[in-house]
């Protein structure tokens, strides 16, 4: 039945928007939140950690606490650390990779965001990719621009990444790639040409979440992504009460496309990850 991995990005933007139904921010909340999402079908959790004042944190102790807690509460769930840059000390973005999460996000180039430059210096990209390779972490390549596909290829050619990364097209961030179906076609065709062994997903930000999910599923995406980090609404007039509610909606979308929701074991097989608990 061609199962689909549901990824949940649990923690919303910082600072919280007035109408943001508060993604989990403390380690204790971040350990609790994924469980209902896991029960609703999420096999992969994308994690940012926060300081006590909710600013983005790079503290390895916080990543370790969340990693350990989720592994205990949600056996087999794929844990993905963010190495994203917003509000973090650039040099600390890879400082938790020694904890060997199953996966980590990796942006392979820079791009404009709504109010900042999302800067990913080539030397930093190489450093993060090297750490992921050395810790046997599967990269999720964040594609905010067509050139980022080619930058990922260069990492493969340099021996910093294997031929089978997971690729995520991020659509609908203002000043980056708009959420338009023909652009997904272009990105996907180019990825299949340049990184033919990669698995892939497409993430729509904000109100684009469900439509981008449909476009990806219609093209055989290996995964879908949801969660309060990207979107806080179930529909135009309804806020999501939780990550689990967004995951349940994603699971319904997956089934509507005639596919099944991947178990954690299936998700690990699809992404080429080691089974849970294996060294
Ligand atoms: Mg993120």
Image (spheres, rainbow, N blue to C red):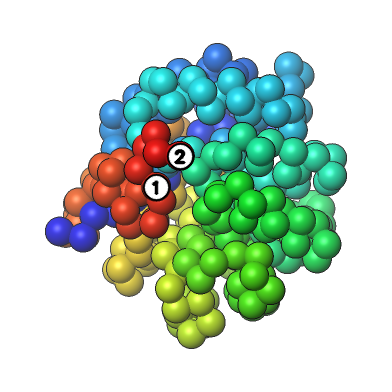
The residue sitting at 61% across, 25% down in the picture is 64
Measured along the vertical axis of the image, is residue 183 above or below residue 69?
below
Query: Does any portion of residue 137 appear in the rendered image?
Result: yes
Crowding near the residue tagged with mark 2, few <14, some 14–19, many ≥20 C-alpha atoms within 10 Å? few
- In the shown orientation, is residue 258 left or right of residue 192? left
What numbered label is drawn on residue 132? none
Residue designated by label 2: 279
The residue sitting at 43% across, 32% down in the picture is 243
Of tags 2 and 1, the one toward the viewer is: 2
- In the shown orientation, is residue 227 left or right of residue 49? left
Q: Indicate yes or no: mark 1 CB to ligand 1 under 8 Å.
A: no
The residue sitting at 31% across, 41% down in the picture is 264
Q: Which quadrant, please, contains the N terminus?
A: bottom left
Labels 2 & 1 near each other (Cβ < 8 A)? yes
**Residue 52 x, y percent position in the rendering:** 73, 16
Measured along the vertical axis of the image, is residue 99 above or below residue 123?
above
The outermost residue toward the front is 279
Residue designated by label 1: 274
SS category of the residue bearing label 1: loop
**Residue 236 x, y percent position in the rendering:** 43, 44
Query: Does any portion of residue 248 appear in the rendered image?
Result: no
Compare residues 79 and 237 and report the one nearer the observer.
79
Q: Indicate yes or no: mark 2 CB to ligand 1 under 8 Å.
A: no
Compare residues 205 and 140 and report the one nearer the observer.
140
């Amino acid at each position: 039945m061609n199962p689909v991995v549901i990824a949940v990005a649990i923690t919303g933007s910082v600072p919280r928007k007035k109408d943001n139904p508060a993604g989990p921010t403390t380690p204790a909340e971040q350990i609790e939140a994924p469980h209902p999402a896991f029960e609703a079908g999420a096999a992969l959790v994308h994690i940012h950690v926060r300081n006590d004042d909710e600013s983005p944190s790079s503290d390895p102790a916080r990543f370790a606490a969340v990693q350990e807690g989720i592994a205990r509460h949600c056996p087999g769930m794929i844990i993905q650390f963010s190495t994203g840059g917003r509000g973090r000390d650039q040099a600390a973005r890879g400082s938790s990779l020694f904890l060997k999460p199953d996966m980590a996000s990796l942006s392979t180039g820079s791009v404009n965001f709504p109010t900042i430059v999302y800067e990913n210096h080539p030397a930093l990209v190489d450093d993060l990719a090297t750490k992921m390779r050395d810790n046997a972490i599967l990269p999720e390549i964040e594609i905010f621009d067509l050139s980022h596909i080619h930058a990922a290829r260069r990492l493969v050619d340099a021996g910093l990444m294997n031929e089978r990364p997971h690729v995520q097209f991020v659509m609908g961030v203002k000043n980056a790639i708009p959420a338009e179906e023909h652009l997904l076609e272009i990105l996907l065709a180019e990825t299949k040409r340049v990184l033919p062994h990669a698995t892939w997903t497409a993430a729509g930000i904000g109100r684009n979440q469900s439509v981008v999910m449909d476009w990806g599923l219609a093209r055989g995406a290996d995964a879908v992504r949801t969660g309060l980090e990207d979107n806080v609404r179930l529909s135009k007039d309804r806020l999501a009460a939780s990550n689990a509610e967004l995951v349940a909606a994603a699971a319904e979308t997956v089934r509507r496309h005639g596919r099944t929701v991947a178990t954690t074991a299936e998700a690990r097989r699809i992404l080429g990850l080691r089974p849970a608990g294996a060294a």
